Image: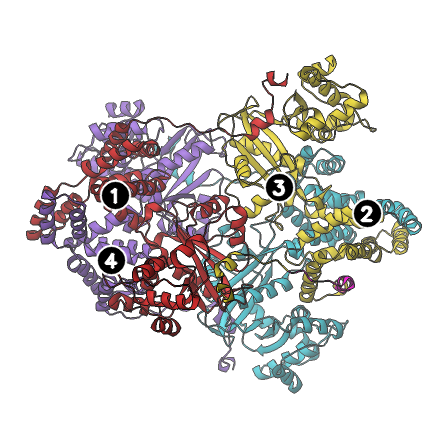
Chain colours: A purple, B cyan, C yellow, D red
Amino acid sequence: MIATNPLSDLLTTLLDRRPFGRKDINGQDIQNACIRLLSERAEISGLQLAASILSQYPMLNDEQLIAFFEFLNNDLDIDATRVAELAVEYKTDPSPETFADLQRACEPARQRLFRRLNEAPGATAVIVRMRRDLLKLLKERPELAKTDHDLKRLLRSWFNRGFLVMQQVNWDSPATILEKIIAYEAVHEIHNWDDLRRRLQPSDRRCFAFFHPSMPTEPLIFVEVALTKEEFDAISETSADTAVFYSISNCQAGLAGVSFGNSLIKQVARDLSRDLPNLKTFVTLSPIPGFNKWLSTEGLKQDDPAKLERLVAKYLLEAKDEFGRPADPVAKFHLGNGAIVHAVHSGADTSERGMKRSSGLMVNYLYDLNRITHNATQFMKTNDIAASSAVKAQARRA
Amino acid sequence: MIATNPLSDLLTTLLDRRPFGRKDINGQDIQNACIRLLSERAEISGLQLAASILSQYPMLNDEQLIAFFEFLNNDLDIDATRVAELAVEYKTDPSPETFADLQRACEPARQRLFRRLNEAPGATAVIVRMRRDLLKLLKERPELAKTDHDLKRLLRSWFNRGFLVMQQVNWDSPATILEKIIAYEAVHEIHNWDDLRRRLQPSDRRCFAFFHPSMPTEPLIFVEVALTKEEFDAISETSADTAVFYSISNCQAGLAGVSFGNSLIKQVARDLSRDLPNLKTFVTLSPIPGFNKWLSTEGLKQDDPAKLERLVAKYLLEAKDEFGRPADPVAKFHLGNGAIVHAVHSGADTSERGMKRSSGLMVNYLYDLNRITHNATQFMKTNDIAASSAVKAQARRA
Amino acid sequence: MIATNPLSDLLTTLLDRRPFGRKDINGQDIQNACIRLLSERAEISGLQLAASILSQYPMLNDEQLIAFFEFLNNDLDIDATRVAELAVEYKTDPSPETFADLQRACEPARQRLFRRLNEAPGATAVIVRMRRDLLKLLKERPELAKTDHDLKRLLRSWFNRGFLVMQQVNWDSPATILEKIIAYEAVHEIHNWDDLRRRLQPSDRRCFAFFHPSMPTEPLIFVEVALTKEEFDAISETSADTAVFYSISNCQAGLAGVSFGNSLIKQVARDLSRDLPNLKTFVTLSPIPGFNKWLSTEGLKQDDPAKLERLVAKYLLEAKDEFGRPADPVAKFHLGNGAIVHAVHSGADTSERGMKRSSGLMVNYLYDLNRITHNATQFMKTNDIAASSAVKAQARRA
Amino acid sequence: MIATNPLSDLLTTLLDRRPFGRKDINGQDIQNACIRLLSERAEISGLQLAASILSQYPMLNDEQLIAFFEFLNNDLDIDATRVAELAVEYKTDPSPETFADLQRACEPARQRLFRRLNEAPGATAVIVRMRRDLLKLLKERPELAKTDHDLKRLLRSWFNRGFLVMQQVNWDSPATILEKIIAYEAVHEIHNWDDLRRRLQPSDRRCFAFFHPSMPTEPLIFVEVALTKEEFDAISETSADTAVFYSISNCQAGLAGVSFGNSLIKQVARDLSRDLPNLKTFVTLSPIPGFNKWLSTEGLKQDDPAKLERLVAKYLLEAKDEFGRPADPVAKFHLGNGAIVHAVHSGADTSERGMKRSSGLMVNYLYDLNRITHNATQFMKTNDIAASSAVKAQARRA
């Protein structure tokens, strides 16, 4: 009987949510809008056009998306003939006017398009998303790398370190940010909100992220830190002497190659050592992704923990890639930052992935704030791998 | 093998959390500290004493808790002989000095104690908790109502409407606040964070809470609002013409009797009508907790929805308590605020509790901002129940 | 010709400001409104009534103001007969009900009035202003001290240390706050905005104030600090070892007797010593207002700086009031806080007022955070004046 | 006697301030540091190098400054031969690799230098200052325009509209910002803090500015608004129907050509019309800088206000530059934004400058939010000057 009442289960309706619609888009429209935006001079209609392009973009289907990027890549490219002419002219007449003409000719129209798009509110996040989508297409369509070159250059300029803001993320942070920490944690999965609380709320845990002012609820990269004593006991934060960086996650696929990790670790180390003067040691607790693969290539299968530790030491200090740089990608990152190989631990990561990649072994890289500049410069020049004497001894005995 | 390594499963350890300790407390100590705090004049040691009392309080066991409140109730009471003497003196000599002496004599030492305690950081929340604990004890120990009288009076002064801050709670709010919304929702349970997001994130939902500056992460009361068209369609917030207050929850048991609900609903209605000028109608969607009980008392069991609606109208308009005021407590609250009975709906709350209390019926109370003062004054004088003509007609035909 | 144009000098008009009107008030209206507010139960009209009373209050003329306070003092007083009866009843029947009745009878209606008034936005500042006005009237009308007793008690409860917020005031603070620092500086006048900048902007200066959340742009009390080396050289803040509190100003005449100075100095000392670990010494640089008067009373006129310093030491350590406490009011304040007399300086304040009060001499009181509790307790018990051995030696040799 | 005391006038010393030192710089050092920064790959030492360059830059003397910009202009220019080669190559092989090589070759090293510099804290403001200094040198050294081209392009990218934040500036704003409003007001001088208060505090005045997140205390441009009735009476803000933009000031000489004025006016108009729905008319009150010059060129000297108004109308509607665009620069700006010439007023600006430039006449340009896009597009295409019928009639009768 109740079912005939149009108000039946009113409350349930109120507490329910509806799905959002998704309308069909004409792929040609967005291209025409881009062309108009490039020719448009009055700012207001430019803003409306930009907003319209940005709102249509996420609704493009796969085929339209490819067409859109091909349009950017080909139709909005430079005129090489004109560049060549102007460059020749500039050789004989290096005047400011010729310089300006040459610079304008060198800049593809798509660069200008991205800048005009960015004037609309919320645009930056959509442009980062464009690059994410483009990167996925590159394998199949390597010619699109021209557009990627432009986007990466633009994003490097916009996401310049000087424009980034480091913020602590904790249990007082907005849920809009916290849900992204859950989503983006790449190293040690956060399963739910209670799990997140365990990472953020205890006084011996810290989490820091970089943000860009135009994307205030989108972390770009974050690092999780545990404050301990002698590296491994969980204790109160004021007596801690060691900060362990146990997880670092890049959040925006569209910012690949626009590197922040280096800056973040160092900034966090500096800030923590100022706030907690007892902190003396800053180490990562890092995976060794290439170890087991190397072991089997070398035919060195092994079960004994102590022997495994020695082999890890050998791997980290001696295995090189074709350019003479460390074979292990994580090692390459931290050594390039000026860290040194500090200590290896068996049985540290007994997760399935940890066992598969490196039989449960992990490694600490040590960031000595007084030495990292020197170390990084040395490493850049010589590719020599700096390590503690203990690790060096282990490597020798492997 | 790995198990023998002291660092084994290092990462797991890092991601795990330790339980917090709880130490035993000597109940006499806290009473002695209170006595010292009352005699103490140097502020600093007072702060330390207060902080120490406040940190011991939550660790008192049941027996110690009763002893503590009896100590407050009896040992820190007024000296009635002195009050009587001074009152007699004041009759013949109404001088400021006698007045001051009399006032001091009338104030129990426990009042002064609460004020001294409150000087320590974070004290207010503990004092609110004290009252919560005390209220639980009152049934068994009615004599403690003296201390409750003092606490309630103090909290009414401290939580004066002029000191409260209304804030919107949304998905950008800190997790520390959001987890309390989950915990405190008293009307329609929020099961988890996804459920909460459904209440807060959609553009046609709102949540507002009162906060006190000394308890910035503790909502005191909050109301959830759905913006709809003609009361019941979920739509975009800008075209909405109706705001439905579908849930209102008091959060602090220790603030019982320190009423804010009235102020909150009116403040929210005013703020919403300013921000969304299309909003014309402000109604609650309220339970009718006493209906089924009344039905069975009156011997009027009924299944037909239309007949039930008429009976609800009759119940709300005619059932009175011993003082001639509405029998239904929710009706009494909203009518006292100046709202009127607006419309009744069968099949609106088909939850177990909704069926049990009122066979799924709910009622809208209408807050007409131009009429509430007049209505409230009338209701206070005459106990007449204001209602829409539709509901009046239903009641007549019941 | 231009003058006939109604738009002439349009721009000047835009850049000019008009005076605000001031309308006449009927003094009886505000009293009637108070009586209605006390009887009113519906909150909304209560808010309107309260707002109306608060907006009328500042427009009362002198005569109306006196009539208003006499109304509060006499018409809204307690019923002493009833208090006496209830107190007698409570002696034989100490029940919660009698207790509650007695408490209600002891509370003058004006107390309830102030609380109802405070529910309106911005009320707290007006109530503080009421007390300021009342204090001015007390000399002529000492009987109004009853109302003052109530107001002071209420304000002490509302301005409880636990509700105050300490904030640094610097050159980034809002102009609304800064203009009040200029206005309220009581010790060393700030002549203009450039003068203020010199106090706030240099890195070796600090200013801290207490605020109440309901009066966010009104400092209650503030202290100015200079960071120095060995007390007297202006240097960079990180190498400073000494913080000199050279000026402390109460801002709200209406909060006289609701003391914060003690808390502020200690809180600032604690916060500074945490942020700048090199700071070891916290001293005031204080005037000696009673010195020259004492000198002439004792017939000890003197010009030699060294001899004057010894006489100041003698004055501070030996001159007592009728209760055996220090004769000098500033000394009484700091010794009561747990500070000690640290050093005296001739030629320190060569301003006209400084020369007149104490021939240019000033004194440092030392706040040793580890000793202040002990010192304050001792002083309270014995009235013994703690001092450095240097000052004691000077006093002996005077 | 007192003068021999090393502590004499201690207080005066405390209240005094010391001048800051300025050390000599070796001009070659900063160039060497730039070259190292460009070759440097380790980020940390890069940051130190960048910080060192930025702190040395403001100390360069005039000669060193010229040398520094010549170094940027010549030593860090592109290699045109390589650009030409790569452009020719790209014509036959438009591959991503060749594209990337060509783009790298087209970018002068100084561009990369500016980006590296910007990674240091506070760098953006110094780079803006570099451009300010460079612009001053351009007249004497026009060849430096190449470096200016790069800087302007970079700053346009960094100060993209999407990265700017509009904020209201009022009497609650920080003094650090307010003192800059005083300093930067270019149209109607603000003489002191009281003068500023008169512009900001009244409820019928508004001030809005654009900020960049990396320069949070530096307004980029601000506009002052008066809310009036029928354009000219100063009244309460809620009944106002007209917003008069009476002053707009660019703050950063180093951002010349990075235009924001257009965006700011439109954004303010939109925000105000949303917050104050009674506002119907948005007009500027603008100077007519070229009028008197034009009058004398045309030999039309005149004293009668009514005739002058007609001549102003004629001037604004008919006087054109060599490209057929309005001769008056202010007219050109507002017409390009989509505004129309609305009304002319004699006797509106009787200041010395106002009399000299335009005999006291001013003009309103009207921003009709529904028409500005259409107007701006039309103006861009046809250079036709839109005006009210009243102004058109005046022009005809001139």
Camera-side residue: D369 or B41? D369
Q: Chain of mark 3?
A: B
Label 2 amino acid? Ala
Dot 2, how many residues are within 10 Å of its Cα: few (below 14), some (14-19), or many (20+)?
A: many
D394 displayed left or right of D43: right
Name the residue tied to disc 4: A113
Q: Residue furthest top?
A: C397
Identify the residue shown where x is 43% and y is 68%.
D306
**Marks 3 and 1: same chain?**
no
Q: Which residues are magenta?
A: C21-36
* Mark closer to the observer (3, 2): 2
Residue B142, horizontal then vertical, whole percent: 77, 54
User: Where does residue A86 sit, x and y in percent of width and height?
Assistant: 11, 49
Residue B249 vs B80, above or below: the answer is: below
Label pair 3/2, CB-CB below 8 angstroms: no
Work out whether residue A393 can be spotted.
Answer: yes
Q: Is residue A74 magenta?
A: no
> Are the residues flagged by discs 2 and 1 in contact, CB closer than 8 Å?
no
Q: Which residue is mark 1?
A: D139
